Amino acid sequence: MQVETEGMSFSYKDKKVLESVSLRFGEGEVVSIIGPNGVGKSTFLHCLNRLLAPSEGSVMVDGRDVSEFSLKELARIMGYVPYSPASNFPLSVIDMVIMGRHPYSRIGSAKDDLKAAHKILEELDIEDLAFRPFAELSAGQRQKVMIARGLVQDPKVLLLDEPTANLDIKHQMEVAGLLRDLSRADGLSVVMVSHELNIAAKYSDRMVLLCKGEVFTAGSPWEVLTPENIRAVYEVDADVADHGGRPYVMLNGPVRRHA
Amino acid sequence: MPDQDFADGYLRYVRHKLIFIIAALAILAIAAGISCLVDGRPIGVLDVYRIIWEHLTGAKYEYATPEYWDDFVVCQMRLPRTVLAIIAGSSLAVCGAVMQSIMSNPLADPYTTGMSSGACLGAIIAIVMGFAFTGPSMYGIVGMSFLVALIPAFVVILVSRVVSTSPATLILMGTIMSYMFGAVNTLILVHQEGETLSAAYLWTIGSLDNVVWSDLLVPGIVSVVGCIAMLAMSGKLNVMMMGDDQARSMGLDVDNFRTVLLLAMSVMVASIISFTGILGFVGLVAPHIVRMAIGSDNKYVIPASMAFGSALLLVTDTIARLVVYPYEIPVGIILMFIGGPLFLFVVVRKRGYGGIY
């Protein structure tokens, strides 16, 4: 399944957040959207799954505009894992994951929904958490539960807003590795927003660098993570080394501006 | 974990929720029996259940025999009030649980969203306009209550559709509207005299006094239909608890769903408040205590809140009738005395959950 944006722009009132973004996401690839704070990374994800409507341009899924899909149809195609999941209500892990079955729910589907949730929890190796309160889990466990909720929608594309934020390095690698494995095994397309450049470089097939709402560059991690690009977009001096065939960014410091 | 072990674990997980619901129903049954003891003629608690059972199974008694009077006192004089408490308690508690879910805010209930105050203002306007409390004229009070209760519902619908706003802001708007309705209430009341003033004022406090079976038709039907409909939508309500964006990403048409539910709850709240006046805290406290005990899956929260809300209202109403017996205090006052500290206890007793939990 192919997701494509064509000249997509988005504005919050007069403030242009995204400007003519044209990108394509193929089946089974892991794509990281990177860039400094406030360049429209999360807005881009929200436009992909119709949480926001682009002011110009379009989002197409297999050649069909997303606005033509019903919300349930779209939820069966795209799963969404929000940034920093939390709930105002006491929910257990199984309650949380079963919610993801909503696009398939019908009278008498409870047993099937439970089975689907169990299968996903088993696949992610978190079934022992099933009946524990979500709020009592560690940040890494919560993130896995939210990924489970996205996956139980049985989507073709999984959108994730900073899935490795607030995680320690072990959990960052676990979560990113899990997403790559799912993509390889099931042909799932993964589009994730990330601030962790090295994690994104290690686990992504492609990267998209956004700057001021526009695509600064897109391509393989080696094409995107160059010292020049990092300097131009992040205003940070960095060296990029080869680490196991992947680029590894070493930060030197902010770019010094001279009067 | 094999499928069977997981299924067994799930059954254990569900069992304690079901046990809680059964326990709440048992408390409700006991509270209902005790509430039928109060007033004049001494009848034992077990006799109350027997009399109700015999009445339901069609027993007939000779006029003016002791059995006749027992049946008359329990089934015609005391039971309507008990049933009204059950209807009002369950409806308001379910509306509270549903509002908290659709606004993704644990502080939402018919009172904090302004709906109760709106319904109360509508009732007072109708009373001042001369509608009576009994007979067909009563529907004028219900209708007026519904119309004014729609105002906060429409404001919430409009604001959430037109302006992207947080659930906390919606509650704040509801509270502001409550104050404004309260101001209009007071303005109307200061220009009234005698019976109209006392009748209208009682509406602002809340009471279950002076109810007969025929009064229960409208709130009874609305409550049963409303609560069943809300229970049928428990899956969608669960999704709404996660907030609008996540609910939409899981395929729920958030705006239309919220609109339909707010309109339905306006009818439910108006049909109760127009008979009882404002009954605060039931919609807030009952769902919170239920969630503390069995979590937030609305499939269980809604029936448990119905039982717990009814029991809460029955117990407070019984206390209201006993504190200065043979006189009685309006139940709304006792609800404030008991509901306030109870809610404070819920807020303070954090258990590592998000929000106020």
Image: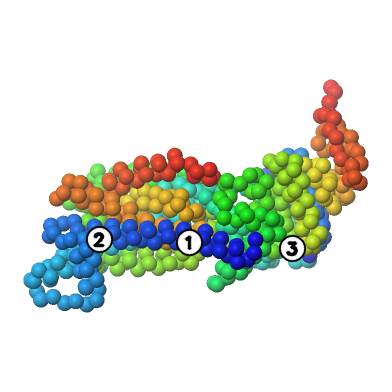
Is residue A181 left or right of B77 when viewed as pictured? Answer: right
Rendered position, B323 above or below B303:
above
Which residue matches tag 2? B33
What element does badge 2 sit on? helix
Residue count near mark 3 (Cα–Cα under 10 Å), binned few <14, some 14–19, many ≥20: many
Closer to the N terminus: mark 1 or mark 2?
A: 1
Question: Callout 1: residue from which chain?
Answer: B
Which residue matches tag 3? A156
Residue at 39 percent across and 61 percent down: it is B22
Q: Nearer the viewer, residue B60 or B272?
A: B60
Residue type at mark 2? Gly
Rendered position, A258 above or below A9:
above
Residue B336 falls in image quadrant: top left
Total labels: the figure holds 3
Question: Callout 3: residue from which chain?
Answer: A
What element does badge 1 sit on? helix
Residue type at mark 3? Lys
Task: Say if residue A240 shows up in the picture.
Answer: yes
CA gap between label 1 and label 3 equals 36 Å
Which x, y percent locates residue B165? 56, 47
Which x, y percent locates residue B297? 51, 58
Residue type at mark 1? Arg
Q: Residue B276 carries which label?
A: none
Which x, y percent locates residue A189? 78, 59
Residue at 41 percent across and 65 percent down: it is B226
Which residue matches tag 1? B15
Residue at 71 percent across and 48 percent down: it is A163
Question: Callout 2: residue from which chain?
Answer: B
Q: Nearer the viewer, residue A252 or B19?
A: B19
